[in-house]
Amino acid sequence: MNSFYHSTRGTSESVTSKQAILAGIAPDGGLYVADWVGEKKLDLAAVCAQGFQKTAEDVLGALLPDFSADEVAACVAAAYGDQWDTPACCPVTKLGDDWLLELYHGPTSAFKDVALQMLPQLMGVARKDEAADGKKIMIVTATSGDTGKAALAGFAGVDGCGVTVFYPEGKVSDIQYLQMATQAGDNVAVCAVRGNFDDCQTEVKHIFADRELAARLAEEGIVLSSANSINVGRLAPQVTYYFDSYAQLVRAGAVELGDEVEFVVPTGNFGDVLAGYYAKRMGLPVKRLVVASNENDVLTDFLTTGTYNRLRPFNKTISPSMDILVSSNLERMLYYFCDGDCELVASLMSDLAEKGSYTVPADVLARIQGVFACGRADDDETRAEIRRTWEELGVLIDPHTAVAKAVLDREQASGCARVVLSTASPYKFSADVLAALGVVVDGMNGFACMDALEAKTGTVAPAQLSGLRAAEVLHETVADRQKMGAFIESSCARVFL
Ligand SMILES: *Cc1c(COP(=O)(O)O)cnc(C)c1O
């Protein structure tokens, strides 16, 4: 058994997990995968007897074998400490006859924290590797709202790393604006850009392709990198909460050690649900993984017919983090279900790029369907589900979680314990949640909606959101798109030199 990663599209280049984490994407455009995932199973009885942090150490130790046990332990201590509002990090609570896995107790109140609190720690260790030569890393990301804050919070204060976030001026919610504009830390930079999200993203791509800029930064020992959701260092940490939630169910007496469970996952880029598949390979008794989509139901169609077709209208929904037409992490799943046939994966991906669609062979589809079920819910169903879940079960859920709950409600009971992954605090989407509960929110700002949601439900907004009211705005730069490169250079100089 080797311990290397290679691209989904070819095996010629092998890299360590540290190299894969620093590189993000493979040079041929594929995603880094390892064939040995699951050859060694986690000890389930041990997992059930320990807490989230120890399980995180076991999971990361298994998936990132070139990290020493001490390195992993230090990363876990830094990523899963008291920046979480509960020591359990990702608690499981009751949802009627089913269960809710709450992934939103981190610093930005959404599930991306699980990965983005850990990735910077892993990068901080990997950059000290001999081959990486102690390079300084500037993370650059364009955000339409949520990921930017999670990246800022994760990289703030991490030695040898910096983070620069661009967002479209006036096009993020007032709360999202404050989350970013008030971010403290000597190594963070935030810039509003005149234009829309696509402008920001296109310019970031240009910046990554700018060889002259790269050469100037290289002279100072600086490299630009992204914190993309296809990074191995984001995927691996997400496996932890599948194992840990199972442990919580066993301790609650909901399942016996070894019983199968089902997970329903609100899905966008397919990273979250793919981590569930990794957990299954690594020995977790997962009966099925249910992929829940909103009106952008490209995955529902794919998992039903075997044809993935991105040529379709893009719908803006009330679950925006699932508004995605190309689910990039799906490529890893294809790799495993094609039995590691890199040529086939490469040809499917070139069909997707050139023709806009691809179809997997029937036997591959059948195997995928043996593990992954699917379902979709539109905005009206999502709102109705938020209301029903509150009124009938007394549980307040956000629109992303509600998509998954709506899909669960249509599934026939399978006789095993069912867990809905809850990916954001309802207070991140106060206006839509309030409206779903029947309150008229026209003209109310983000804080007024938060207050009204507290008053209506008797629940309490997370302190990191309500506390924004009093936080000091630290970042006020607004720039034209053409100035984004210069902004990065000046933030590199400020952070590193
Ligand atoms: C990112 C995100 C998702 C989708 O997760 P993927 O890993 O991209 O499938 C769902 N809900 C919320 C709130 C998110 O931020």
Image: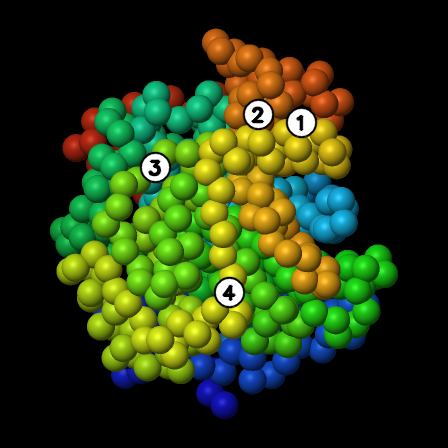
Disc on res. 436: 2
CB contact under 8 Å: marks 2 and 4: no
Q: Residue at x 32, y 53 (%)?
A: 326
Q: Residue at x 70, y 69 (%)?
A: 260
In front: mark 1 or mark 2?
2
Q: Would the CB of label 1 be found within 8 Å of ligand 1?
A: no
CB contact under 8 Å: marks 3 and 2: no
Q: Is residue 264 left or right of residue 124?
A: right
For marks 4 and 1, the one nearer the N-term is 4
Q: Which residue is mark 1?
A: 461
For marks 1 and 2, the one nearer the N-term is 2
Q: Which residue is mark 3?
A: 315
Q: Would the CB of label 3 be found within 8 Å of ligand 1?
A: no
Question: Which element carries disc 4, helix, strand or loop?
Answer: strand
Task: Give the class, few, some or many, for how many residues have Cα within 10 Å of label 4's Cα (few <14, many ≥20).
Answer: many
Q: Is residue 236 left or right of residue 463?
A: left
User: Mark 1 and mark 2: span between their CA atoms?
Assistant: 17 Å
Q: Residue at x 36, y 52 (%)?
A: 298
